[in-house]
């Protein structure tokens, strides 16, 4: 894909997320690898709705900022995923309501934030790690992601929002939507007896789709 087409794809997907209420105002950020090993990143303080392809922040393959508007303050978070997950071609961070609400619940599992309600959450996300609260933009968020040693494709920042990496920007956007949809299901079903996927079913899915689950 040419860089021009990639810029347009980023903005088209971001606008779709914004228009459907998955992020709001100037919240959220998105990045993706370019063919030359660099990065395109949403600028700081911008809304996903009217993102301008020509104004996306541009980094070269060495991580040097070379053009566009100033990048999101969450660059340490994005960089940590690219550094620890060789398969990461894109990273998306949202402030989606149901996932944030679920992160506020006192009884959520920090090692497996999303209950295994559907096969698609397992297939697209694996286990999601709930990280503690950090002040937005704190480099310590990146350190926390590095501490996972590339074992998680997705994390949930407590009181803040989900972050998902994917092979492509489209895959990352699809996966973060799955995270939000599963969080919504989990909240709708709180206090209701449910039949979540059992360990055997989860392992069948993980094996078929080559998903890291047990570590």
Image (cartoon, rainbow, N blue to C red):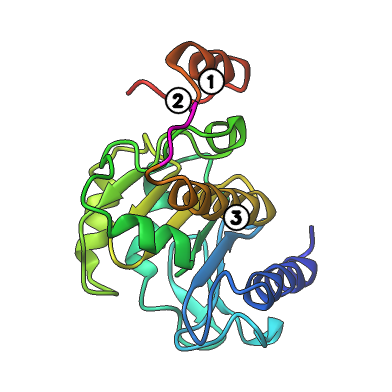
Residue 109: percent from the left, percent from the top? 27, 39
Q: Position of residue 213 (x, y in %)?
A: 42, 24
Could you classify mark 2 by the number of other residues whose Cα lies within 10 Å: few (under 14), some (14-19), or many (20 or more)? Answer: some
Nearer the camera: disc 2 or disc 3? 3
For residue 90, side relative to residue 214 (left or right): right
Determine the image quadrant of residue 44: bottom left
| Helix, strand or loop at mark 2 | loop
Of marks 1 and 2, which one's residue comes earlier in the chain? Answer: 1
Identified at 71% across, 71% down, the residue is: 16
Report the predominant secondary structure element of the magenta stretch: loop
Q: Secondary structure at mark 1?
A: helix
The residues bearing labels 1 and 2 have C-alpha atoms spaced at a distance of 7 Å
Q: Earlier in the sequence, mark 3 or mark 1?
A: 3
Whether label 1 touches label 2, CB < 8 Å: yes
Q: Position of residue 215 (x, y in %)?
A: 32, 23
Q: Which mark is residue 206?
A: 1
How far apart are the alpha carbons under marks 3 and 1?
20 Å
**Which range is magenta?**
192-196
| Relative to 138, residue 208 above or below | above
Q: Can residue 157 be seen here? A: no
> To which quarter of the image does residue 210 belong?
top right
For disc 2, the marked residue is 212
What residue would you read off at disc 3?
177
């Amino acid at each position: 894909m040419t860089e021009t087409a990639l810029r347009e794809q980023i903005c088209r997907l971001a606008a779709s997320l914004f228009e459907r209420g998955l992020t709001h105002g100037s919240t959220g950020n998105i990045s993706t690898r370019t063919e030359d090993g660099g990065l395109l990143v949403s600028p700081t303080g911008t809304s996903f709705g009217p993102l301008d392809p020509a104004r996306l922040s541009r980094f070269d393959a060495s991580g040097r900022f070379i053009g566009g508007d100033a990048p999101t303050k969450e660059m340490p978070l994005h960089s940590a995923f690219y550094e620890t997950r060789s398969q990461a071609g894109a990273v998306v961070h949202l402030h989606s309501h149901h996932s944030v609400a679920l992160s506020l619940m006192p009884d959520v599992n920090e090692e497996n934030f999303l209950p295994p309600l559907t096969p698609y959450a397992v297939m697209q996300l694996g286990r999601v790690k709930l990280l503690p609260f950090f002040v937005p933009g704190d480099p310590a968020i990146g350190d926390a992601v590095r501490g996972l040693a590339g074992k998680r494709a997705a994390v949930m920042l407590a009181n803040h929002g989900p972050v998902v990496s994917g092979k492509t920007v489209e895959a990352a956007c699809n996966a973060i939507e799955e995270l939000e949809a599963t969080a919504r299901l989990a909240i709708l079903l709180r206090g209701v007896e449910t039949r979540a996927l059992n360990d055997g079913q989860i392992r069948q899915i993980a094996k078929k789709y080559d998903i890291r689950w047990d570590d």
